[in-house]
Image: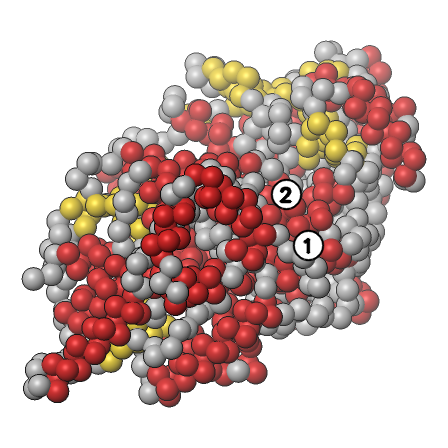
Amino acid sequence: MVDHEADELERALRRAVRGEVSFDTTSRALMTMDASNYRRVPAGVVAPYDADDVAAALAVCRERAVPVVARGAGTSIAGQATGLGVVLDFTRHMRSIVSLDPDARTAVVQPGVILDELRTAAGAHGLTFGPDPSTHSRCTLGGMIGNNSCGSHSVAWGTTADNVRELDVVTYGGERLRAGRGLDGLPPRLRDGLRALVDGDLALLRTGFPELPRRISGYALDALLPEKGADVARALTGSEGTLGVLTEATVRLVDAPAARALAVLGYPDESAAAEAAHTLLPHGPLTVEGMAADLVAGAEGLPKGGAWLFAEVGGATREEALARARALARAAADATTDHTVVADPAGQRALWRIREDASGTATRMPDGSEAWPGWEDCAVPPARLGAYLRDFRALMAQHGLRGTPYGHFGDGCIHVRIDFDLLSEAGIRVFRDFSTDLADLVVAHGGSLSGEHGDGLARAELLPRMYGDEMVRLFSRFKDLWDPAGGLNPGALARPQRMEENLRFAPLPRRPVDVEFGYPHDNGDFSAAVRRCVGVAKCRDESVSGAAVMCPSYRATGDEQHSTRGRARLLHEMLAGEVVRDGWRSEEVRGALDLCLSCKGCRSDCPVGVDMATYKAEFLHHHYEGRLRPAAHYSMGRLPVWLRAAAALRAAPVANAAAGVAPLAALAKRAGGIAPERDIPELAREPFTRWWRKRARGAARAAARGGEHAHGRTVVLWPDTFTNYLSPSVGQAAVRVLEDAGLRVVVPPEPVCCGLTWVSTGQLDRARAVMRRTLDVMAPALDAGLPVVGLEPSCTAALRTDLPELLGPADPRAARLADAVTTFAGALEDLAPDWQPPTVDRPVVGQTHCHQHAVLGDAAERRLRARAGLTGELSGGCCGLAGNFGFERGHYDVSVACAEEQLLPSVRGADPAAEVLADGFSCRTQLDQLAGRRARHLAEVLAERLR
């Protein structure tokens, strides 16, 4: 589409619809891909407000012969949520649960309703929606209906098609209709055409579809047979938006078991688990999920074995569910190597998380090489699964490919990501040859090319191998009845494109991009790092649960460009250079990254380990290279310099006094790019290092007089910028506790810095220089093999990750320092295991620092708190201040929204006697400025109780 045509289309759509119409670069770039291997660039995006908007948008597009694709959360794995022309985004407005009738056990929903929202609403009545893909926290009902999604509970409650009652749709031709059972309610053109199609090929429709629980491929034309009630709604389900645009759906709800228990059964290998899966079905399980050790090696909580089946059962009570799970485990005992039965909901969630994250973790092979969808979900009759898997593994080996199968063993449906080389012509030929061979293998086992995610652009070309040419011609006739102009999702299902067309990797650079960080997990290739995002969109979860952090800015704004996936998509398009054309200078990418808090939550919470904080630092470095930077980069990016200068000049009293004078403070904040709503933190009158030097001199004099001095193991206490100049009480408390534990504390003789503030603002040349100087100072300690104890989680995490990843193998000292770094609690646990902390016996509330969660882990902190009698959980999510982020002008509202998600409500609702804990300076500052509560570092709480 040429520019003037796109402009005219945009103007016409703006006149016709009430919802948003977006033809800008960012909006288009965000919609080029779903969770598949495919990429198609749309002309624009419309977020319809209601069904009238849908009809109006279709009318505008129909007049101009512009194709239309309906899209939910964009987690489709076969490419059907990508498209040319106009994308209809249903996630912004059309996401209401219109009604819920617990007596009739039905709900009426709009297409943008997130599955978990429906399940929560139904759960209030003891009901649920049966199908539950692993993306249940973000996938939409419209997308599930379009793909006929299934999930792990389909052995009990079937596919989405089994749970759809009526569908309201608008065709590309403008007809608005309600599809249910029977043809009589349809417009005469459709009614007569469908009747003729069915009556003309009754024998083929009755015999041409394999009988298996996960037959998702093609159109479900057999649902139109008279003996099946001419179920038009079921025939439309799974049509991938090629027949009509859904505006409302009536769906069935089912009874949710009051209690559930999970039996995890271990087997010697994958074949044994696959052979056993269908034998569990007579016991009435809700799920029978399978995975092997090559996918989940090392996962905690799994029983002994080389492969596992997850069999969930329900009951009216916990005891009944537990008894049924144990009975199932006993019945399977002859074939199992071991088993475990879990009735505790938290324990079950932890185990299910292993399975649900597999769609992401499977994208990397054990050696770190990339693996891709494309043959993500073939299905065979469950009793044939073992034989099929053996043949499947053999076929991969024949083509020199690797993959890690897992999935819905009880339904005979296998998920797998395969290490296709989709970047070279030779690799793409292998992809095609393997695909055709596998299609034949699936058919030979009586299976379906798709068992969950649909055919899309990935498999529709191969439908003749499954159904034969005559049936595929019927598919085309069916498509033409509904969409004679071919305007809805062209290229998917009927008249498909070739499977190797529109691969999303095609426009990417073939040579590594010149970058600053080492990207050790991606062989130094920034393009490979960006390709980590495969689109499963865990970052689009709108409610944070447990200790999870990712993605706070998306939850605050609800805007795709502020999700981890959205930013990765924009970086992908920046590298491709077709939609985002300014490279590192792109304002679209800068705008999306501007609200990234650099919390690093994605580094741990994203199933594929996307590290947007590092990508942001990389981008900012190149974006501002040779150019004037924002004021905040100079004020806060170079904060250690200013604080060191203030300490050297002993200017803290003057600076603090000036900060208390409103006009002076306002002027300073304006000049420094600081949010006017923020208070400037108070500088310590005496930095920690000055206090330490005086104390050390006193200790030396005492030792010279024959006094006592510590003889325990020596540790280096890292005097980070925030502890040193802003919270020296934390460092002083840490010294007391570490010495009480029998450790000998030393502090670097000269100023050291992890470089974090320069990294977070993308000043990477300066960060590298700071880090190298730090390594020079730390060289004697590293040579002596001394452990380095960090107090500030963000600085400790920077030493652990940013330092070695920025300096790389060229400076081996960086890796040595990273290996030497430990946390305060980790040092006490590892170096003073016999030390008993003082008893505090108080409840706690507060914040686990995001970098602690993402990089360092907080297991040692939890154990230390428990030993000290500090009970309760700290908040997950992010405090929202996140170093310089929350102080920068324009970020205040998002910063507050992040804090209001978990932290502030938990503190407001806490026991007044609760100890408010926050090891991070940012978290403590946020609590002080937004809640008026003083939070303390764990070291301070323990030091207060020492004898």
Q: Which residue is mark 2?
A: 561
Which quarter of the picture shows residue 714?
bottom left
At 65% from the left and 27% from the top, the residue drawn is: 234
**Contact (Cβ within 8 Å) of mark 1 with mark 2:** no
Tag 2: Cα neighbours inside 10 Å, few (<14), some, or many (≥20)? many
Asked if residue 639 lies left or right of residue 472, the reply is left
Instruction: Tell me: residue 343, above or below residue 775.
Output: above
At 39% from the left and 67% from the top, the residue drawn is: 648
Q: Nearer the viewer, residue 465 or 152?
A: 152
Asked if residue 425 lies left or right of residue 26, the reply is right
Which quarter of the picture shows residue 181?
top right
Asked if residue 490 lies left or right of residue 284, the reply is right
The answer to whether residue 228 shows anywhere in this view is no
Q: Which residue is mark 1?
A: 571
Whole-percent x and y of residue 767? 54, 69
Q: Amino acid at mark 2?
A: Gln
What is the spatial separation of the Cα atoms under label 1 and label 2, in whole angstroms? 11 Å
Q: Nearer the viewer, residue 228 or 813?
A: 813
Asked if residue 467 lies left or right of residue 751, the reply is right
At 68% from the left and 50% from the top, the residue drawn is: 589
At 37% from the left and 38% from the top, the residue drawn is: 930
Instruction: Tell me: residue 856, above or below residue 314.
Output: below
Whole-percent x and y of residue 874? 30, 47
